[in-house]
Amino acid sequence: GSADQETSSGGAGGSGGSGGTPVKLQLQWVTQGQFAGYFAAVDQGFYREEGLDVQILEGGSDIVPQTVLAQGQADYAIAWVPKALASREQGAAITNVAQVFQRSGTLQVSFASAGITDVAGLRGKKVGNWGFGNEYELFAAMTAAGLDPSSDVVLVQQQFDMLGLLQGDIDAAQAMTYNEYAQLLEATNPETGEQYTAGDFTVLDWNEVGTAMLQDAVWASTDRLADTAYQEQTVKFLKGSIRGWAFARDNPEQARDIVVAQGSTLGASHQLWQVNEVNKLVWPAAGGAGLIDEAAWQRTVQIARDTRNAEGQTVITTEPDDAAWTNDHVQRALDELSADGVDVTGTGFSPRTVTLEPGGA
Amino acid sequence: MTELLATARAERAAPVPGAPAGRLATALRRGAMALVGVAVLVLVWELYRALGPVQGVQVGGERLLPRADPRSMPGVVEVLRTLGRPEVSLPGSRTVGVAVLAAAGGTLLMAAGGWVLGSVVGIGLAVLMQRFRLVERGLLPYVVLSQTVPVIAIAPLVAGWGGRLQLTPALSWQPWMSVVVLSAYLAFCPVAVGMLRGLHATTGIARELFRSFAATGRQTLLGLRFPASLPFLAPALRLAAAQAVVGAIVAEISTGTRGGIGRLVLQYAQQATSAPGRLYAAILGAALLGLLASALVASLVAVLGVLVHRSGGPR
Amino acid sequence: MTRGNRLQVLLPPVLVGVSALLLWQLVVVAGRIATFVLPSPTAIASALGTVAGDVAQAAVATGTTAVTGLVAGSCAGVLAAVLAARFRLLDEVLSPLSAAANAMPIIALAPVFNAMFGSTSPVPRRLVVAVAVFFPLFVNTARGLRRIDPVHADLMRSLAVSGWTVTRYVRLPGAVPFVFTGLRLASSLSVIAAVVAEYFGGRQDGLGSRITSAASATAYPRAWSYVLGAVALGLLFYLAALLLERLLSPTLRRTR
Amino acid sequence: MTTHPPAPAVRVAGLHQRFGTAHGDVHALSGIDLDIAPGAFVSLIGPSGCGKSTLLRCIADLVQPTAGSVEVGGRSAHEARLAHHYGIAFQQAGLLEWRTVQRNVELPLELHGVGRRERAERARQLLGLVGLSDVARMRPSELSGGMQQRVAIARSLAEEPPLLLMDEPFGALDEMTRERLQAELLAIRARTGTTVVFVTHSISEAVFLSTQVVVMSARPGRVVRVVDVDLPDRAEATREDPAFFAAITDVREALRGGTARTPALGGEDR
Amino acid sequence: MTTHPPAPAVRVAGLHQRFGTAHGDVHALSGIDLDIAPGAFVSLIGPSGCGKSTLLRCIADLVQPTAGSVEVGGRSAHEARLAHHYGIAFQQAGLLEWRTVQRNVELPLELHGVGRRERAERARQLLGLVGLSDVARMRPSELSGGMQQRVAIARSLAEEPPLLLMDEPFGALDEMTRERLQAELLAIRARTGTTVVFVTHSISEAVFLSTQVVVMSARPGRVVRVVDVDLPDRAEATREDPAFFAAITDVREALRGGTARTPALGGEDR
Ligand SMILES: Nc1ncnc2c1ncn2[C@@H]1O[C@H](COP(=O)(O)OP(=O)(O)OP(=O)(O)O)[C@@H](O)[C@H]1O
Ligand SMILES: Nc1ncnc2c1ncn2[C@@H]1O[C@H](COP(=O)(O)OP(=O)(O)OP(=O)(O)O)[C@@H](O)[C@H]1O
Ligand SMILES: Cc1ncc(C[n+]2csc(CCO)c2C)c(N)n1
Ligand SMILES: [Mg+2]
Ligand SMILES: [Mg+2]
């Protein structure tokens, strides 16, 4: 297939095609289970039912979703809160309208044999991270534990894969629960010839350490939010998205298939694992999916202001203004969905137990 | 000073370009030797895998010879096998090999666009720099330095501003166009530098001759400098082809554009923990793609050369 | 070089640079372009002011990678070209291989070298740089070595010398301008390769990781400060190559 | 109203030429004054390295004199060049390797907009003149040294210019060919009245061809003497004419005088 | 036991040379037979493009003859070349631009392992011989055409080889310098007994210098006649010797005979 064909079909992201208000959603990475809810909403026609024709734009390593949004090339963007706050400081007028992931999905993983059971155990170790703004939870945790990130550990650039950890180049590696951690469990232990098990590793979970920062959220244009039509559209968009996420919660296999059909090449069991893990980040949502928890927000802002990285930089330098987030729209969406009988809290959600096949197949 | 004439004479010793049989034989021989090269590489790889130390060789704390374990250096057979496996373990999935081929095709198209654009810009700049000494002084350092600005710094600009362009009412900016532009960004430099060198590579006598004819700048350019630059332009275009491929791949990753080998590398790299063979398969695809691009440009240049030669013009 | 001469050489690039900066500033200010799209030169300058020390430190780290790779890759490239010019068989085997290596994006090579040599080692990055600079030197040197004035070929033959002696006395001196064309290209290439190689592994102490870290925090003025560091490093390398060229080929001035 | 003498074809006044080299300046020409009448055939002769080529290149506006002025056909050398006032044949042939012999001869015509048919016809005729009809389609590098030089001569004649500048054009030719081409050159001049400035190191050639022989001294090049040659016409018999021998002796003597020092050693200015 | 006559310095037998070009073959030399005695001074003369340079290059083992054999000093041309049996000066100077003039002259000595001091001394001496002492440190491109040629001559003499091959070495020199260098060449030959093969297009030069003049015909080059020149010694006075004029006439006639067709038109073989 020629390049333009594939991009446009990929860019179409399953756009309904039938009329509707055109809406563009910018993702922060390529198509994968992390974004299952949005793909499911398109696939299941949830957006169409709201009168929206949603086109999903994939991300790349240098695509910054929130600036794409701020430049007006997308109507909504999925972005991590600290990075989006940084962009706000640089003048990107964007507002968090729904905190889809209520929890952080980032881990620091090491071999159990290395004995890194707490953050202090990182002292003197080779600590891997991706950079790309994913390192602040780690730095906050180290700072809290009395380690100086720039001198007490060796910071190592980590690749997309986990070979560094497996080959012993890195002592503690960064991993998303829904992706890289699964890669570890899909890999074969050369000593036993069997797959690795969770028992082979110890993990530092920032949610438990207390330095978790808010991740995937839906961001909207602050300026356009003054406009009632855009407000309406935002509510509709959030309704469709939350229904999508509810669908992914209730039908993870189907959600997996939808993502695969969109061109993800990750293995089937891996994708299912990913959808399942992402569900854990969304559900249960006490006040309803997407509702921004003020405490979590404040913690994120605090860490973003106080934590210095290896260069001595913080993510943001001042308290974000009030326009940085609002629950108005997501609340309306939740209310309307509840009225329609959609379970928006997932109180009864219990994750599956996904068995990872070798290589994620 | 006699450089130009000298090449011309030296190249006369080579087989006359007019003879088709000779050309075919040379092409065949070249292809065969390339295969020999690949075979040697494969052999060295496999031998090292079989005999090399699993933890490599460290000298003074730095590993100077690589590790030989299967995760670091997957076997050639394993990589080839990967090509035949389905990409996703769902029915109807295409094989990795097909995916690599399709992606290579996609990148080739975008790289071709970048090559053409970059070459045109590069030649234009070179002509400008040759015509105006001051422009050369002012611009040449920046042409070279432009290549030290990483794509990460300009990708958001290109993707961002491109995204706002409405080329025609029917055609808006497509993501692949960003890739083409970024690919051209890497391709134009060798062309500009090589072409400029070629435009300067005239003998003093020839330049004076044209001066004595009171030839206009354009006439000197077309009648003297252009023909004289051809021996320099040809390799520059080949370098540019390789750079265009690199640029296209980097830009695909950078902008997340689908349909090319860069995107595939990105995807497969994320799976490298458990299936390192896939990454190698994609890399193999990238390497072959680069070769193909260089070879295509080389044959294009050769064909043009023969055509021009037939017409009694520059060779 | 006389003083006026030096001014003639230095002034145009400085003028171009200054006017480009002015234009940039004008576009950003007049076009009200947000910092997260394109920071203005003044914004970059003020960011640079606060991180200058760090830029320098990072530039040293990246520069070390680049120099090692550049030296290794250039030597290998010239050597390979010399060998290829001597043995046709080697030429036919090496040329397509080096073309393939050249067409290999760093993005594809870095993970492989990281896997092979360990992602925390500096070796993979240096190898990436070496591979990146190999091709321009190989191609250009080979080109220069092949161009021999027939009279010179006759002369050497008449003096009953062949092979290495011809290489040393005629081919290599004749190829010097070509080697330097390659080196000029390679000098900036080595910097970019070193920067990009940092995205994939190794210690996070260089310009590459700083650029990504700043860019991902949308701190574009800071990111551009580090980009400037890379450009300055590139300039330094380029000038070093030029200087070397002047030192080693005094006759070049007239033939340009 | 007074009648003016006709403007000289070439007027060189107070010409100085220095070249900067890594080892100091080279003073190539020093205070050259020279008037060349229209229709004259002037030969420049002098020891190797005395600046003959340099002087010719100044007239052709190919180098800027360090000091002094050059007028050609009543205008500045620069304007004359732009007006296609002269044709030139260099010491080295300077053929373009990527053109066939014929297309090398056509080059000036092509550049000045002469149609394809006409210039092909003219090139064929000129190649016949220099005895190279059968190599028209070959490449310069396939010719011997003398053949290349003849192609360059043909090229310089292509436009029948009012002024012909020739730098040792017959240097690489055998005596037969040389004599034939000398005759052709004289015939062309007789027919078209063209002015010729001709560099040679053959005294007899200079005398045989010229109306004036300009004798130059070793570096820094100066005009030592201008020998007027007064021969009724130029034919084979001329070479036995006593006036011919007298002129040869004059030139030889002037040359000896000008090269009392070892030839080409002009060290005093370095 | 019988005594053999001394082996010829150069023996060419049945030599043919063809060049393939894009437009068919060029037959450059046809059936050349030539014996050159040790110590002889042989000039090759003939119309431009007749194959003089080609013949010299065959003797120097720089081109492989299409047919026939070349022996030099009793061995094959190939072995002779490897034994550094000859020195050669080409039609184009062929200097190395990246070496100074002096180091260009030193080149053969350097290549053949002569020590630094000794070769510098020899180069200085040779540069003095050709009148270029003061440009020893300059670069070739800073010299005039004739100066470059003199450097090339000095280089060919550097090793005092048993055989000297020279292709129009004095072509770009003024008459004074030429005569001086002719005298030097004769002196060198008298001193060292070297054999010289010399290409020229000057009949008088050929006759003045040579013991034999080989007259060649236009392409395909053949030997038309070998004119023996029997002059007691070579000095200024020789140029007025009747034997000198007789030989000139002989050569001229041989040349006319050989070039009954238009010069250099050897079209029949194409
Ligand atoms: N580009 C240059 N740089 C330095 N010196 C030069 C340059 N061109 C010429 N010269 C010097 O100027 C002097 C005159 O050179 P020119 O070529 O005019 O001599 P010429 O009379 O033509 O000699 P010949 O008869 O040998 O051709 C020489 O000494 C030469 O070294
Ligand atoms: N490499 C070549 N390819 C094709 N033809 C050639 C080549 N070299 C020489 N010739 C041809 O061979 C013939 C003899 O050339 P050569 O150079 O020996 O002539 P020459 O006698 O030295 O002439 P001149 O006095 O003009 O130097 C010429 O017709 C020339 O065109
Ligand atoms: C160039 C680039 N490389 C790696 C990451 C790491 N990373 C952090 S979150 C995320 C998506 C979910 O896995 C990924 C891949 C990145 N952001 N950008
Ligand atoms: Mg001259
Ligand atoms: Mg010749």
Image: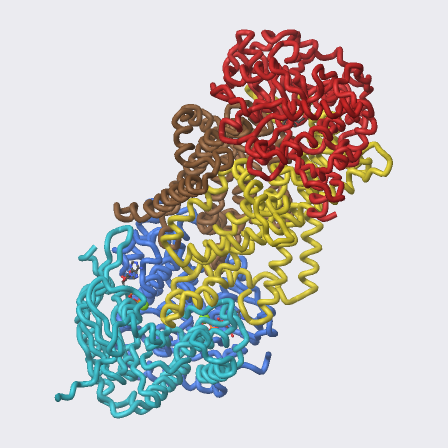
Chain colours: A red, B yellow, C brown, D cyan, E blue
Q: Position of residue E133 (x, y in %)?
A: 26, 56
In this view, the residue farthest toward the right is B91
**In front here: E47 or A332?**
A332
Res. D51 in view: yes
Residue at image point 30% right, 74% down: D80
Q: Position of residue B122 (x, y in %)?
A: 51, 52
Q: Quadrant of ligand 1?
A: bottom left
Q: Position of residue A291 (x, y in %)?
A: 66, 20
Q: Position of residue B108 (x, y in %)?
A: 67, 48
Task: Count every numbered label the image shows and give the total.
Answer: 0
Q: Quadrant of the C terminus of chain D?
A: bottom left
Q: Is residue B241 above or below residue D109?
A: above
Residue at image point 74% right, 28% down: A37
Left-right relation of B162 to D22: right
Left-right relation of A98 to B155: right
Left-right relation of A132 to D192: right
**In front here: E245 or B21?**
B21
Q: Quadrant of the N terminus of chain D?
A: bottom left
Q: Is residue A299 above or below residue B226?
A: above
Left-right relation of E47 to C109: left
Q: Is residue D147 above or below residue B300?
A: below
- The quadrant in which residue E30 appears is bottom right
**In front here: D91 or C221?**
C221
Res. E263 in view: no
Residue at image point 41% right, 53% down: E108
